[in-house]
Structure formats: structure tokens, C-alpha cells
């Protein structure tokens, strides 16, 4: 029986393989990826396990290639029912929303199926759309124009598809749908509640006279929150509206002042477009003392890792040590930051 290679020999072989492929960037991460793949050769995973892992990795690779050219463009993912007909007022609502967001310079991303997904692509147009399609035996390809433009990727697994629909987007609009839509809605909320996703607005869009999401909220508030299974502040993660103008304002307004965040050790740095005035900073410290360490909220220059990575060095910043159990309150802090004017005069209402 041939002797088993040592860890050092495997590491050298992996490095040689990366050299052969001409890899210059992110070699450390790719080395870990290849070595993790080799760990699957220990005989424990079944053949089916290996086929699932292989297919999932290949799907993610294709999706990464789809999104890479559009990395600097903000994206709205739209979820909703594939069963919504073109004659349904909900279809027109979705189409209008997608068109307005695309007109603001965003891309609209959907699951590339019929119904609400088709309405999203119709509203945004092929040049404003990206699709992540699930392969189903009872549905044919719905958007050949996206495929022709290289703006569509097909996936076998729901979990890889959902990962890409959520990972790549800066906002989410969810229209009434069935089990899949509800699954996507609750997963979004779970990711925000646990801090596993970057903060983003979620708009739950109804049509006038058809309060689907209001009925959903009655269950969430009356059962889930009432029983202590979620926090009352978790309701800050979403907004329900039947007005497309309100939905668009919720999406775009989330980034009115808030830009992004980064953790440097226990410190969370929040990048802004306008720094809060002294009075606004004092109000933030007063109103959000419950979710900060004793250091409070302070202004800061870019920290070392941010400077090394050249991350938005031109933007003003504040920093805090956030109590990570209170993500709903953190969303409320973002809303408060978006109301800051930096001491500028506030224009009188029209």
C-alpha cells in the first residue's frame, strides 16, 4: 500500500498547483479551499455528499462570475410568487417598483422565474436586470433575453440560489407569495436579527385593499413577539407599504447618510456621507446608550485595516462597541443617522 502523503507534502503540492494556474491574488484563501476539498477524501462523505459539495461549489463559482462585473452597482433583490398573473394589480406594482429603482441607477435581481420575477425584469429592462434561476422540472427558462446578455445563471439547489440572491444585494422588496416567498422573508429577517448579514432595508409590498403583509405582521407581533420569541425592536427590520413611492423611499433612504460598516476587533466603524454635529452625536449617545459599551459613540478617522484596504477613506466615520444581541436597535440607530444633517439647516417642509 502506498504511503500517505504528509501535510507538508500536500501543502507544497497545493502551492505548486496554484503556481501552475498562475494564481497571484488571494492565494491563502484558495489554498485553504483546496485543502478543505482534499479533506473530503478521508472516506467519510458518501458519493452523494461529494456530488452535492461539487455541484454547490460549481454553482457558486458561476454566480460569482455573473455578479463580478456589477460589483460596484447597488442591487435590489425582489421576491414574490411565480404564480402572479400579468393581469394581477400586484404584477403592475412590482413592475413599477423595479422600474423606479432601476431609474435610480440600481440593478434589479430576481429568481428569474415567471410572475413577480418576470414583472421585476420587465420593469427594470434587460440592461437593469440580473437573474438567478432555479432548475425545476415544471418550469422552462423564462428569460432568454437575460441569458443572451450574460445576465442569468441557473442553479440546481435552492440554498445556493438563495445565498446569491441575498449576499449580493443592498436592499430587498418582498411581494405576496407562497411558501418560498415566506421562507425567503423569514431567512432575511433571521440573518439581520443574528447579525449574519449586512444591514439592509426590507420592504414588504402590498397592494391597496389586499393587506397580505398586515395579516402576516399580526401573526408576527401577536404570536412571535408576544411570546418573547423575538424582540419588539426586530420589527425595525422591515417596513410594510402599499405605496410604491414609499417603498422606493425606504430603499434609497436607507443609504441617505449611512454608507457601510466594518468591524475592527470589537469596534464597529460606521462610514457616513455626513458626520453628525456635536448636538446630534450627543443625542445618539443619549438615545442608544443601551446598545453601546461605556465608551459610547465617538468620531474616528479610518482605522488601520481600513487604511490598508483603502476602504472609503474619504468618508467621515463614527465608531462604537455594539452589543451584538440588539441588532433591531442597531437598525434604529441607522435610521437616526439617516436623519442627521451634520448641523446644516433643515429646509422647511413644502
Image (cartoon, rainbow, N blue to C red):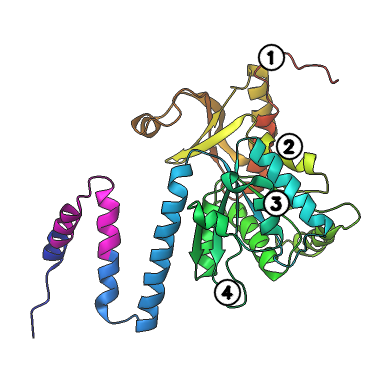
- Label 3, label 1: how far apart the Cα atoms are: 31 Å
Foreground tag (2 vs 4): 4
Sequence-first disc among 2 and 4: 4
Can you tell which mark lies on residue 277? none
Q: Residue at 52% of width from left, 49% of height from top?
A: 168
User: Does the magenta run of residues contain 31?
Assistant: yes
Q: Earlier in the sequence, mark 2 or mark 3?
A: 3
**Which residue is under mark 3?**
234
In the current view of this chain or complex, which residue is farthest to the right? Answer: 209
The residue under the point 69% across, 34% down is: 253
From the image, state whether disc 4 or disc 3 is nearer to you.
4
User: What residue is disc 1 on?
Assistant: 344
- Magenta highlight range: 13-35
Position of 253 relative to 228 (above/below): above
On the rendered structure, is 237 left or right of 43? right
User: Real-space Cα distance between discs 2 and 4?
Assistant: 35 Å
Place of residue 4 in the rendered image (x, y in percent of width and height, measured from the top left): 12, 76
User: Does label 1 or label 4 sit earlier along the sequence?
Assistant: 4
- Per the image, is 336 magenta? no
| Left or right of 215, for residue 148 | left
* Mark 4 vs mark 3, CA separation in Å: 34 Å
Q: Which residue is mark 4?
A: 136
Q: Which residue is mark 2?
A: 249
Amino acid at each position: 500500500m502506498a504511503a500517505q502523503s504528509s501535510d507538508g507534502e500536500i501543502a507544497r503540492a497545493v502551492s505548486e498547483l496554484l503556481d501552475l494556474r498562475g494564481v497571484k491574488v488571494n492565494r491563502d484563501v484558495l489554498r485553504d479551499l483546496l485543502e478543505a476539498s482534499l479533506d473530503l477524501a478521508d472516506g467519510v462523505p458518501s458519493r452523494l455528499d461529494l456530488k452535492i459539495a461539487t455541484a454547490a461549489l460549481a454553482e457558486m463559482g458561476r454566480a460569482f462570475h455573473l455578479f463580478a462585473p456589477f460589483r460596484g452597482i447597488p442591487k435590489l433583490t425582489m421576491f414574490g410568487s411565480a404564480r402572479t398573473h400579468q393581469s394581477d394589480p400586484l404584477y403592475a406594482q412590482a413592475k413599477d417598483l423595479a422600474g423606479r429603482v432601476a431609474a435610480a441607477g440600481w440593478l434589479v435581481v430576481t429568481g428569474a422565474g415567471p410572475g413577480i420575477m418576470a414583472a421585476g425584469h420587465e420593469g427594470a429592462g434587460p440592461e437593469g436586470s440580473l437573474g438567478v434561476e432555479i432548475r425545476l422540472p415544471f418550469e422552462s427558462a423564462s428569460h432568454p433575453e437575460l441569458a443572451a446578455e450574460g445576465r442569468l445563471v441557473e442553479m440546481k439547489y435552492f440554498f445556493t440560489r438563495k445565498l446569491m440572491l441575498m449576499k449580493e444585494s443592498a436592499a430587498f422588496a418582498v411581494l405576496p407569495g407562497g411558501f418560498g416567498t415566506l421562507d425567503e422573508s423569514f431567512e432575511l429577517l433571521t440573518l439581520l436579527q443574528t447579525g449574519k448579514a449586512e444591514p439592509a432595508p426590507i420592504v414588504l409590498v402590498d397592494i391597496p385593499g389586499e393587506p397580505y403583509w398586515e395579516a402576516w405582521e399580526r401573526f408576527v407581533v401577536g404570536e412571535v413577539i408576544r411570546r418573547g420569541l423575538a424582540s419588539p425592536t426586530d420589527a425595525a427590520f422591515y417596513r410594510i407599504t402599499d405605496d410604491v413611492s414609499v417603498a422606493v423611499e425606504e430603499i434609497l433612504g436607507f443609504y441617505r447618510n449611512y454608507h457601510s460598516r466594518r468591524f475592527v476587533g470589537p469596534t464597529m466603524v460606521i462610514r457616513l456621507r455626513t458626520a453628525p454635529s456635536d448636538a446630534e452625536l450627543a443625542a445618539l449617545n443619549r438615545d442608544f446608550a443601551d446598545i453601546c459599551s461605556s465608551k459610547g459613540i465617538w468620531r474616528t478617522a479610518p482605522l488601520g485595516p481600513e487604511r490598508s484596504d483603502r476602504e472609503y477613506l474619504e468618508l467621515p466615520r463614527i465608531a462604537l462597541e455594539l452589543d451584538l444581541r440588539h441588532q433591531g436597535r442597531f437598525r434604529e440607530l441607522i435610521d437616526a443617522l439617516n436623519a442627521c444633517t451634520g448641523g446644516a439647516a433643515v429646509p422647511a417642509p413644502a
